[in-house]
């Protein structure tokens, strides 16, 4: 993008190509963040001609994404406690759950894996509770990943957070006696499985009854200020708020324990962004906005100090674009003090969501730094 006119490019394209499957990998309201659009081959030429006619500046990259991103076939993790879980590869949904259950088996005194529902395709939905029981309700920090199927590095990053907590339990024992960490590792298991065996670029869940090409975007399906579809395939919000079982069961947990939840982080990819509510409006009047901004800047400083990378901090709608029915706005509407959407590395890439496996560990470390800053902040306020 070179000027303010370019900021409206995605709106222009959505108007011109209403019948096409347009997939905006990134949208932005600032010239510093490029807009990236993924299209199938049969659509590319039409879009190219339109951009030329409107004097937009653009580049085209052609790749076979499904071939590039084909996951490795790896041996399933067994119940043998001597097996080492590899954080250098992307794991299947079953392997992820096996890993979490293995942590529970090894650390029963402070790790438990619990069911909270079933997905559209009847896969069991799990969350992990990490914390020592003291016989009372404890404050919580909730962190989730995998809402969007293709964002694999978010799935892997949340597992690194789990691993760091259990491996360094002596360091975190005092904290885990005061707070519980609640981790939803894969909010959209059906979509994740399909992105591994079918369409690598799949984003939504697998309820395709009303949107065959894209399913439902779970991050437009939460009930706070839910909004009807504008016709965009990839961000189809469902037929009503919480129409999807994945978001419904997740929201049930959030609502039930809202009096305990002090912080909420939802991990996504990509962009190197730490985003604050609101998503639905440009206003920066969410409760505790200044406190959230200050803590977000602490996260940014820690990332710069420890990893020498720069994240951008600010409200979601002002940095990216307005959207309704998001999990972060819903969490904020419940009265949770610290709420963040984290768009992990890379900052920008022609490969977009296809993050190479040699980057998994590094990006997972970034996620843990962000989480650790929130964890210590919440504990300091108890």
Image (cartoon, rainbow, N blue to C red):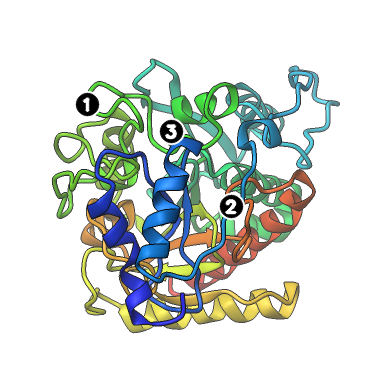
> Which of labels 3 and 1 is toward the front?
1
- Measured from the top left, where is residue 119 in percent x and y? 37, 23
Q: CA distance from mark 1 to mark 2?
A: 27 Å
Q: CA distance from mark 3 to mark 1?
A: 18 Å
The local secondary structure at tag 3 comes to loop
Q: Earlier in the sequence, mark 3 or mark 1?
A: 3
> Which of labels 3 and 2 is toward the front?
2
Q: Is residue 31 left or right of residue 253?
A: right
- Measured from the top left, where is residue 154 in percent x and y? 57, 48
Q: Which mark is residue 329?
A: none
Residue visible at 46% across and 74% down in the picture: 1
Q: CA distance from mark 3 to mark 2?
A: 20 Å
Residue visible at 75% across and 17% down in the picture: 78
Which of the image's four quarters has the C terminus?
A: bottom left
Does the image show residue 138?
no
- Measured from the top left, where is residue 356 in percent x and y? 73, 47
Does the image show residue 243?
yes
Q: Is residue 12 left or right of residue 138?
A: left
Q: Residues within 10 Å of mark 3 (few under 14, many from 20)?
A: many
The local secondary structure at tag 2 comes to loop
Q: Earlier in the sequence, mark 3 or mark 2?
A: 3
The image shows residue 153, relative to residue 322, as above or below, that is above
Q: Which mark is residue 352?
A: 2
> Can you tell which quarter of the image residue 48 is in?
bottom left
> Can you tell which quarter of the image residue 99 is in?
top right
Q: Earlier in the sequence, mark 1 or mark 2?
A: 1
The image shows residue 305, relative to residue 229, as above or below, that is below
Q: Which residue is mark 1?
A: 210
Q: Which residue is mark 3?
A: 188
The local secondary structure at tag 1 comes to loop
Q: Residues within 10 Å of mark 1 (few under 14, many from 20)?
A: few
């Amino acid at each position: 993008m070179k000027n303010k006119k370019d900021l409206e490019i995605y709106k222009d394209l959505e108007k011109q190509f209403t019948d096409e499957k347009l997939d905006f990998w990134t949208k932005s309201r600032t010239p510093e963040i490029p807009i990236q659009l993924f299209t199938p081959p049969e659509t590319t030429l039409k879009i190219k001609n339109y951009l030329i006619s409107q004097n937009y500046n653009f580049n085209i990259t052609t790749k076979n994404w499904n071939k590039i991103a084909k996951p490795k076939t790896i041996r399933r993790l067994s119940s043998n406690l001597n097996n080492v879980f590899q954080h250098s590869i992307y794991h299947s949904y079953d392997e992820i759950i096996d890993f979490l259950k293995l942590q529970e088996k090894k650390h029963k005194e402070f790790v438990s894996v619990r069911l909270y529902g079933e997905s559209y395709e009847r896969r069991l939905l799990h969350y992990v509770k990490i914390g020592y029981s003291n016989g009372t309700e404890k404050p919580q920090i909730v962190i989730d990943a995998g809402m969007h199927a293709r964002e694999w590095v978010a799935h892997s990053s949340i597992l690194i957070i789990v691993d760091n907590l259990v491996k360094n339990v002596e360091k975190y024992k005092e904290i885990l006696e005061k707070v519980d960490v609640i981790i939803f590792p894969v909010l959209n298991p059906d979509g994740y499985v399909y992105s591994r065996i079918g369409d690598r670029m799949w984003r939504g869940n697998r309820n395709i009854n009303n949107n065959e090409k894209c399913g439902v975007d779970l991050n437009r399906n939460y009930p706070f200020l839910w909004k009807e579809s504008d016709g965009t395939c990839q961000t189809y919000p469902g037929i009503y708020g919480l129409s999807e079982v994945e978001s419904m069961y997740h929201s049930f947990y959030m609502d039930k324990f809202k009096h305990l939840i002090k912080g909420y982080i939802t991990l996504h990819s990509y962009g190197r962004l730490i985003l604050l509510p609101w998503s639905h409006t440009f206003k920066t009047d969410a409760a505790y906005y200044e406190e959230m901004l200050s803590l977000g800047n602490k996260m940014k400083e820690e990332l710069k100090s420890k990893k020498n990378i720069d994240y951008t901090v600010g409200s979601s709608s002002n940095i990216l674009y307005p959207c309704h029915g998001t999990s972060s706005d819903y969490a904020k509407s419940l009265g949770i003090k610290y709420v963040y959407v984290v768009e992990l590395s890379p900052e920008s890439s022609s490969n977009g969501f296809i993050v190479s496996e040699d980057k998994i560990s590094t990006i997972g470390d970034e996620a843990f730094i962000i989480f650790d800053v929130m964890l210590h902040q919440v504990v300091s306020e108890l």
